[in-house]
Image (spheres, rainbow, N blue to C red):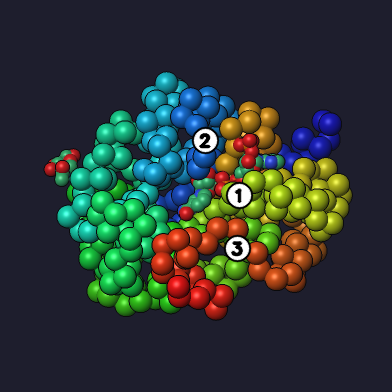
Amino acid sequence: MQTTISKLAASLASLPTHFKLASGDLIPSIALGLYQSPPNEAVDAIKVALKTGYRHFDTAWVYGNEAALGKAIRESDVPRSEIWVTTKLWNTFHAPADVEPIFNESLKNLGLDYVDLYLMHWPVAHKRGAYGRTDQELSENPYPTWQAMERLVESGKAKNIGVCNFNIRRLEKLMSHPLKVRPAINQVEMHFWNPQPEIVTWGQANDVVIQAWGPLSGSVGRHWLDKALNAPEIKETAEELGMTPGQVIISWHIQRGTVVLPKSVTPSRIIENFQVARLPDAAFERIEQAASAHPRVRLFDPSHSWGLDVFEEGTYQKR
Ligand SMILES: NC(=O)c1ccc[n+]([C@@H]2O[C@H](COP(=O)([O-])OP(=O)(O)OC[C@H]3O[C@@H](n4cnc5c(N)ncnc54)[C@H](OP(=O)(O)O)[C@@H]3O)[C@@H](O)[C@H]2O)c1
Ligand SMILES: *[C@@H]1O[C@H](CO)[C@@H](O)[C@H](O)[C@H]1NC(C)=O
């Protein structure tokens, strides 16, 4: 046990603890994800995470636990300035006039006077008061929404802004405008069953840091999560290195150059998920190749219910 811990500790430094954004800010490479974390459990989970060393938390207005995050931060002894807080703009507030009021509501929920990162949650604008009715034009051309987000950076209340769930075409289209602030981040579904190497490569070439959501493939229940933890390439690597399968997967994400956002409300897993280590090149390559060798499994695609082909991967049929 002693040897395993010191071996892990010795190699810990060799995986980046932060990535540099276009703004120059350093973002911690591992965050505690907070999707589906009930507020009362989230407070305790965040406190465990802060004690473990996490300094990055990923919430959203729609998760309903911004207040829990603010409470846990205030009740900890870690200074606000050492913590990276991300929250997100929900689809019903893409009209430019709606952005600042709902952002203010997020700040109020959090009890903070700024966030480190504000993300457009989806490239989908829902019409006001009509959940699920999509504004096709504003979804296809989110530049007016982006300009309202740029004003939040000018006010100093959002240090960085970015997007989620954008494919390369949508991001290139947004970035073809004369932006005052570039998207620092694209946060996308990314895991062993949907590794999207093309988005990782595109992000590196264009100075947009990629964040992997659902990194354990656990967003929609345990089926794909358990299948990933038991994949031979993951399981055998874990056994060889004296790590858990979850640690191997989380390490692989960071080693690919992506920020990783594992979610857990279980103290032992929160601690486990923070103990990452650089994988030997051969093990890394084996997992990278295995992840790309099977057909892509996208765990969450709201295209049909939202009436808009979000990912444009050739499987969506207009109804
Ligand atoms: N931008 C977006 O559209 C978007 C969409 C989805 C998610 N996200 C972000 O990404 C974060 C992560 O995604 P996710 O929560 O959907 O999925 P995930 O992190 O891949 O999986 C979470 C699940 O894995 C379990 N788990 C955690 N660590 C484990 C371990 N070491 N071994 C076994 N099981 C483990 C958790 O259980 P317990 O909690 O019970 O321990 C939970 O059921 C979210 O919390 C959110 O912050 C963003
Ligand atoms: C948002 O809050 C700021 C103060 O932090 C205030 O100046 C601004 O008027 C508020 N905006 C709206 C639309 O409420």
Q: Label 2 is placed on what type of residue? A: Ser
Query: In the image, residue 9 lies at what x, y percent?
Result: 71, 39
Looking at the rendered image, the disc whose residue lies closer to the viewer, 2 or 1, is 1
Contact, mark 2 vs mark 1 (Cβ under 8 Å): no
Q: Which mark is residue 220?
A: 1
Quarter holding ligand 2: top left
> Residue at label 3?
298
Cα separation, mark 1 vs mark 3, equals 11 Å
- State which tag comes first along the sequence, 3 or 2: 2
Task: Residue type at mark 3: give it.
Answer: Arg
Q: Residue 114: tell me if it is visible.
A: yes
Q: How many marks?
A: 3
| Real-space Cα separation, disc 2 to disc 1, in angstroms | 13 Å
Q: Which of 81 and 200 is in front in this view?
A: 200
The picture places residue 278, in percent across and down from the top left corner, at 70, 52
Q: Does the residue labelled 1 lie within 8 Å of ligand 1?
A: yes
Residue farthest toward the front in the current orientation of the protein? 319
What is the crowding at mark 3: few (fewer than 14 residues within 10 Å), some, or many (at least 20)? Answer: some
Q: Report if the beta carbon of the residue with label 2 is closer than 8 angstroms to ligand 1.
A: yes
The residue located at (37%, 49%) in the rendering is 88
Query: Residue at 76% of width from left, 53% of height from top?
Result: 227
Q: Name the residue under label 2.
A: 37
Question: Who is closer to the viewer here, 67 or 301?
Answer: 301
